[in-house]
Amino acid sequence: MSRILVIEDEPIIRTELRRLLTRAGHDVAEAGAVPEAAAEHALDAFDLVISDLRLPGPPGTDIIALCPGVPVLIMTSFATVKSAVDAMKLGAVDYIAKPFDHDELLLQVERVLREGRLTRQNAALKREVEQTWSPGGMVGTSPAMRDVFERVRKVAPSAATVLVLGESGTGKELVARAVHAQSPRAEGPLVAVNCAAIPEGLLESELFGHEKGAFTGAQAAHAGLVEAAHGGTLFLDEIGELPAPAQARLLRMLQDGEVRRVGATRSRKVDVRILAATHRDLPRRVQEGLFRQDLYFRLRVVEIRLPPLRERGEDVSALARHLLERSSRRMGRPPASLSPDALAAIAQHPWPGNVRELENAIERAVILADGPLITADLLALEPPGGPAVDSIPPVLEEADFPLVPASEDPRSPDSMEEYFRRFVLEHQERMGETELARRLGISRKTLWEKRQRLGIPRTRA
């Protein structure tokens, strides 16, 4: 179902066009003039604009400049070669004379829409090729990964909502991309959103769009990312970070297939499949009142759980070789190989950062290597449990942290996470993030990542 805007000042012709296009399965909006269309509609949300050439006020060709990227089909009863040429010079995709044959118009509309879809697909593919994705690829033969592949194969052809679970760095976005690529929506857009990366005050507007004047700074109507995914798939990464108001809007969209922009009085139909992912314990967040139970059940139609790298056995070595080949090729280096001591170090490392950590280690080794052999020292892996005790900053001395009993050495791998949690909760009311990070001997980025992984909210700005 494509969205088409018809701009025609004759009500009879406008009604006839709307009925014809609606019967053909399109979602049709109307306007009587160019200023009316610009004021009442977000023009970038349409797949096609059909406009009469002669209208009250500005000519129909003026709409072309107002909706860059949206194909415009010009129609007129004054069918002359000159007017056709002028319209095409201004950017119209085609030209049709009135009175028009219904079948001819529908064929022309379908051709323009098909060409528009191909253009968008090519642009999306180009963006994807230009990007470097963090996870190293869907590589693996372990039983856990075979189960993941089988679930992807089964769920992809359906319209079911999918919830992908797994630790940070396990490749949840790759699973979402695999589901989309194997689905009937593969020709449509895949829009990926990291819910934790958008400020809470802007999240609703970014996801669901807003109308002009909906809030300070909203100088024009804006189609949200949900509408941008129309006809395709919306991947909501870190869904556990979605604030309560956005959760309610998302639930409404899943239930009714409609989205209402911030500040709008009317809802819009959308055709979007939702894939979501999180490293959070969502049932626990439901119990804590941080996540809606009804939304959780709506998202969890099919669940795909990605295993951490430490549970994937021989997959780790195979994935390391795959990443080494990819990194060498990307950096223009000759083919490289992993030495026996490097393979042993990779097999013994717990990989708390999962595939992302492995990829970073391989890339670092390729950069530092003087030859085609990657050795263990080039990987520079920390020993299990983190840095050696001697390298822990003085700020972690027991005397500095009376909240940790003497029997619970904070340097112990088993008590580090609980120690981190208790220290942050105890001191965050009187310390800023910079001071907390300094006292813990870590960077602000590491502090933020550990907060996210352990579910420790900030109470200070």
Image (cartoon, rainbow, N blue to C red):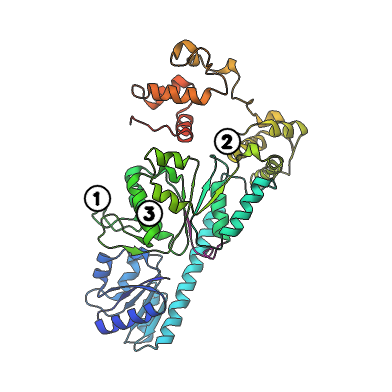
Amino acid beneath label 1? Phe
- Sort mark 1 into few (<14), some (14-19) or many (20+) by Cα contacts within 10 Å: few
Residue at screen point 54% across, 39% down: 167
User: Which mark is drawn over residue 353?
Assistant: 2
Sequence-earlier tag: 2 or 3:
3
Badge 3 crowding class, 10 Å Cα cut-off, few under 14, some 14 to 19, many 20 or more, is some
Looking at the image, do the residues carrying marks 2 and 3 touch, with CB atoms under 8 Å apart? no
CB atoms at circles 1 and 3 under 8 Å apart? no
Quadrant assignment for the C terminus: top left
Give the spatial CA distance, label 1 vs label 2: 40 Å
Counting the numbered discs, the total is: 3
Question: Could one spot residue 451 in this view of the protein?
Answer: yes
Residue 386 sits in which quadrant? top right
Residue named by callout 3: 251
> Going by the image, does 312 lie left or right of 1?
right
N-terminal of the pair, mark 1 or mark 3, is: 1
Mark 1 element type: loop
Residue 55 included in the magenta stretch of the image: no
Inspect the image, locate mark 3, and give the three-letter code of the amino acid beneath it.
Leu
**How far is the residue under mark 1 from the one under mark 3?**
23 Å
- Between 39 and 261, the one nearer to me in the picture: 261
- For the residues labelled 2 and 3, the Cα–Cα distance comes to 32 Å
Q: x%, y% of residue 86?
A: 36, 78
Q: Can residue 132 be seen in this view?
A: no
Question: The magenta stretch spans which residues?
Answer: 183-192
